[in-house]
Image (spheres, rainbow, N blue to C red):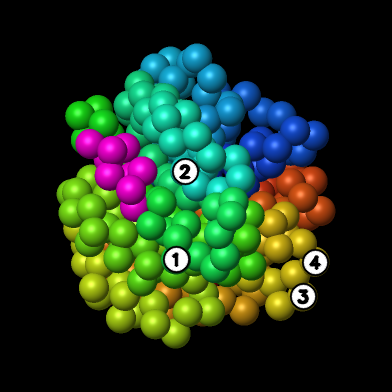
């Protein structure tokens, strides 16, 4: 495992950790101020959300790189399945627009949260088949634009309305079915900490298909499964063991902190939040 105790350049901020991806939350810092604050603290990378980029993708990407930060990723495509994704062509066109934004931003990876169970179906099998079918067209366009796509399985509590894709195993099955080198997975502690099959599946993935690693923690007494994530060290996830598996599979990229915390971290000064991230990353992750 990499030693971060004296070098946290592998640390990346997902800007959602400051509350900027939801209206009415966070301190409202513009991207430029977030970039400067991360650079001052020695972060190596940053990950943005589409809503804060708007029509400024090229400008913001250049601003980040000028400050010494790599743009590790962009969150996320619109859903590709589920009640918000019933029109196949609209889904394809929306995904292509997100890919264009990622390419203009210079983001290494565009994350995919697939969406929930498709209308008229039960369980997840049929919905996952729809995901596979639609991604088969989307990945080709992404490859032409030089963008990697990372399927992010979510915790099973979200299966109904946010992600019928709930395990790394199923994500890799989709990758196998499509067989595109620019399609891989993102491993988020919040969503996989419970999965006793994780180490086996990460070995199956190998370095070539792990495109991202996301840090946070699962609070034992979670009050809101969407907006009550813990800072690293405050919960029950075995952070060191998960990273050992991720890096044992060959991943050596950024470690991206992504914390949705409406009643705690989003209410704090962003500078304090960033400082705590650095300290926890260097000592606990």
Real-space CA distance between mark 4 and mark 1, rounded to the nearest whole angstrom: 29 Å
Q: Residue at x 64, y 67 (%)?
A: 157
- The mark nearer the N terminus, 2 or 1, is 2
Residue 134 painted magenta: yes
Between label 3 and label 1, give the one nearer the viewer: 1
Q: 284 or 123: nearer the eye?
A: 123
Q: Residue at x 57, y 32 (%)?
A: 34
- The mark nearer the N terminus, 3 or 1, is 1
Between label 4 and label 1, give the one nearer the viewer: 1
Q: Which residue does the numbered mark 2 point to in the structure image?
A: 80
Q: Which residue does the numbered mark 1 point to in the structure image?
A: 125
Check disc 4: other Cα within 10 Å, few if <14, some if 14-19, many if 20+.
few
Q: Quadrant of residue 37 in the image?
A: top right
Q: Which residue does the numbered mark 3 point to in the structure image?
A: 221
Q: Are marks 3 and 1 in contact (CB under 8 Å)?
A: no
Range of residues picked out in magenta: 132-140
Residue 223 shows which numbered tag? 4
């Amino acid at each position: 495992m990499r030693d971060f105790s004296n070098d946290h350049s592998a640390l990346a901020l997902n800007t959602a950790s400051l509350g900027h991806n939801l209206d009415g939350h966070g301190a409202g810092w513009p991207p430029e101020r977030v970039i400067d604050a991360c650079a001052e603290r020695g972060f190596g990378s940053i990950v943005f959300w589409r809503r804060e980029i708007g029509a400024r993708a090229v400008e913001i990407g250049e601003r980040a790189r000028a400050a010494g930060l790599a743009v590790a990723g962009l969150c996320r495509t619109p859903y590709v399945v589920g009640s918000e994704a019933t029109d196949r062509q609209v889904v394809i066109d929306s995904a292509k627009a997100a890919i264009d934004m990622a390419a203009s931003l210079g983001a290494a990876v565009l994350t995919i949260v697939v969406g929930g169970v498709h209308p008229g179906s039960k369980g997840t099998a049929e919905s996952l088949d729809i995901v596979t079918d639609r991604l088969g067209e989307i990945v080709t366009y992404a490859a032409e634009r030089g963008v990697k796509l990372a399927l992010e399985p979510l915790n099973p509590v979200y299966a109904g309305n946010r992600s019928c894709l709930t395990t790394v195993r199923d994500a890799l099955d989709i990758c196998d079915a499509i067989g595109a080198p620019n399609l891989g997975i993102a491993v988020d502690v919040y969503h996989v900490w419970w999965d006793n099959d994780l180490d086996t599946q990460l070995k199956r993935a190998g370095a070539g298909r792990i495109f991202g690693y996301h840090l946070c923690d699962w609070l034992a007494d979670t009050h809101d499964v969407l907006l009550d994530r813990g800072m690293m060290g405050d919960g029950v996830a075995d952070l060191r063991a998960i990273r050992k598996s991720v890096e044992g599979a060959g991943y050596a990229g950024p470690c991206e902190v992504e914390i949705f915390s409406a009643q705690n971290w989003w209410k704090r000064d962003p500078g304090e939040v960033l400082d705590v991230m650095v300290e926890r990353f260097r000592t606990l992750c």
